[in-house]
Image (cartoon, coloured by chain):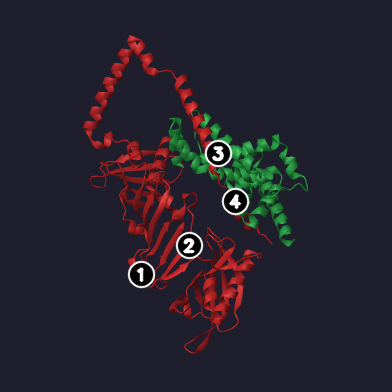
Chain colours: A green, B red
Amino acid sequence: MLEDKLLVLKCKRGRKDGMCRIYEKYKDYLLTLARALLNDTAAAEDVVHDVFVSFAESVNEFQLTGNLRSYLATCVANLARDRIRASKQARKLDAAGVIRSGSDDPEQSALETEELIRLRQAMVQLPPEQREVVVLHIRACMRFREIAKLQGVSISTAHGRYRYALDKLRSLLNTEAIE
Amino acid sequence: MRSERRIKKLVSGLHDTTSAKMDERVLGDVLRSLENSTKRTAVTQPNMWRIIMKSPITKLAAAAVIIIAVMLSIHLWDKSTPSAYAFVQTVEAMQGKRSFHIQTYFQQRRKDEFWAQFDEQGNLIRFRQHEGESPERTLVTIWEDNVKSQYYPPPWGVHLMTRAENTGGGLEGLEEFDPETIVQEINALVTDGKAIMEIQEPSPYADLMTIDVTRTDGKALKKVLVVDPDTKLVVRVDDYWGREGEQVFHHGIEVLEYNKSIDPRLFKPDFPEDTMIIDQVSQEVGMDQGKMTDEEAVVEIVRQALEAWAKGDYARAGKLWGGAPTRLFLTEHFGHLRPVSTVSVGQPEPVQNIKPVFRVKCRYEVKHDGEVKTVNPTFTVIAVDGQPGRWYVSWFVATEE
């Protein structure tokens, strides 16, 4: 979006309104991605915070070659992955029987439909790299080529992860529906 | 069973909102970082003017450059307005849109007329759209506060009120026709070296400038902009498709007014008095899907809707028909489809759409002028906007004898 280029330009000139607009524009979207990847509201908020702060710190050297939305989404995915690795969350989340509730935020839970809560619970059971492909492809509308580059794998591997993830989600959600 | 489509829909529907506390924390830190980053740059970058002024030679050179620049600009200004024109002036003139009134064209035919208003941040507040070539067949859409009011002209004579969020600025494709965005996109294409800009001389429009923007990145597209040399505002943008020499007009917009005040009455529903109101905003309509798959729910709602209609239970039928009033079932174009026999409901067929839509073929008997005959209507079942998990039967019916 061209508006983004102008906003980045404003930020480079130190204009706070430009940065506020970028934050307003993408905050909910990035929080949604971060929470879908981490299943932890506090951690997701921290990731979004770090992404924006880091963007503000480096905005003078920043060159927008593509899409700001995708750029910020990629930053969220990278930081979320680092967090999962650092806290060994991946192992914890994958372990059978250690399924956390769909949402750790009661207020947020109350706003979500039962179906969405079940989806979050099912997504927690996916390996992080599969969950990442699903979230980035469906929710962030990123292409498999971009996701493959981000994950450092081939396009067919990214595609395969996506298929496995969808099959597993379908199986998990259908099992729960039958129960 | 949950289908892949349902899972995609669920994932797409994930939405979190930042809290006021988070906004305060993040924005506080971000703006501080921005300030530090800007200060750092200012400190690390040398003051060029001071360097120049230190040496007598550079001082003289700078003076010469300024004199030449002034002379050149006087010369250019003198030649004619187009020579002095820079596209950035149009980008600046179009910046900060608060309202516009445009007419769109598709292959030389008038298509949509839009009036739109925006807030200080450029977010859409409200719009009105007229779609259709003749006034009596015009579909009118008014949108404000996430409520869309649509007027379907006779034979329907219906005012449909639905919930509609302007997700991603894509409401009714309005962003695509936004003159400010179009100008910014063209500027970026030229800046990125993906297009070249050339002023047509003489301009085919009297007193207006015409600028050709030709893609140089292999895309067979050309835009022609018409700019008012006084205000620098764009008054028309036409898109031509095809390779060079074979380009034909595809679509375009005419900017009738830009940043002019719009009569607020234009954004209030002003439909004829006898219009039937179908309200999907203030009441629950349709049928809840429950644990049924999309396909099962679609068949079930059509069956229930036709059964209720056959029994004359218009309250129930009206709810399943998305909040339709009893009057709708008695209209000429719809009333003749009231079933009098057991209904055979066919398999639902998904329709490619931005939201879930299915078509269902049915077969049953109706009584018309005392005569019983078999009809094969196709009903359309649509997900209710703003009421997740609910479906309704549309009153748009295709029939075959």
Q: Secondary structure at mark 1?
A: loop
- Of badges 3 and 1, nearer the viewer stands 1
Q: Identify the mark at residue B162; answer none if there is no mark.
A: 2
Q: Nearer the viewer, residue B233 or B148?
A: B148
Mark 4 belongs to chain? B
Q: Identify the mark at residue A72; answer none if there is no mark.
A: 3
Instruction: Let me know if marks 3 and 1 both belong to one chain.
Output: no
The residue wearing badge 1 is B272
User: Is B306 situated above or below B4?
Assistant: below
- Distance from disc 1 to disc 2, alpha carbons, whole Å, reads 19 Å
Q: As shown in the figure, which amino acid type bears the numbered disc 4? A: Leu
Instruction: Let me know if marks 1 and 4 both belong to one chain.
Output: yes
Mark 3 belongs to chain? A
User: Is B65 situated above or below B278?
Assistant: above
- Distance from disc 3 to disc 1, alpha carbons, whole Å, reads 48 Å
Q: Identify the mark at residue B14; answer none if there is no mark.
A: 4
Rendered-image quadrant of the N terminus of chain B: bottom right
